[in-house]
Image (cartoon, rainbow, N blue to C red):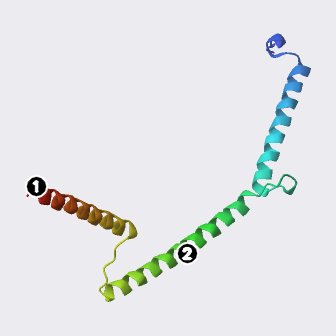
Amino acid sequence: MVKRDESAYGSLDERLDKFEVALQETQRTLNRVVALMDGNKDYHIVGIPDQLAAYIKANEDWKAATQIRVSENDNRLKALESNHQIVISPPTALLLIIIGALCLIVAYFVLTWLQSAG
């Protein structure tokens, strides 16, 4: 029979104590995993399947709302195109107004300069 050196592993009681501590830690970890999966009302933890169902519903609601917005925008664009109206976004309109104002100011200064020179 092979005799082991117990000093390397500790006594049987020490090893059993280590295994008991490891078993308790494993049980605590398993309890946390079960609480995450099933939920725990005491700690206000919602279970993963319930969270997943809520995420799927929120995603479907978002997709439905997006499809409605896209459809509404398509209808608005078709209405504008059928009326042959020019579509200008507000930032573009503002830029055109600023450029026009700058052109008028430059023309005024050029005309004032020409009148004073001539």
Indicate the quadrant containing the N terminus: top left, top right, bottom left or bottom right: top right
Question: Could you say whether the residue bearing mark 2 is in a helix, strand or loop?
Answer: helix
Question: Could you say whether the residue bearing mark 1 is in a helix, strand or loop?
Answer: helix
Up the image or down, 8 lies above or below 39; here it is above
53 left or right of 80 in image: right
Up the image or down, 6 lies above or below 20; here it is above
Residue tagged 2: 65
Q: Position of residue 88 (x, y in %)?
A: 34, 73
Q: Position of residue 11 (x, y in %)?
A: 88, 16
Which tag, 1 or 2, sits closer to the chain's start? 2
Up the image or down, 116 lies above or below 83; here it is above
116 left or right of 32 in image: left
Foreground residue among 110 and 76: 110
Q: Residues within 10 Å of mark 2 (few under 14, many from 20)?
A: few
The kind of residue on which mark 2 rests is Ala
Q: Which mark is residue 117?
A: 1
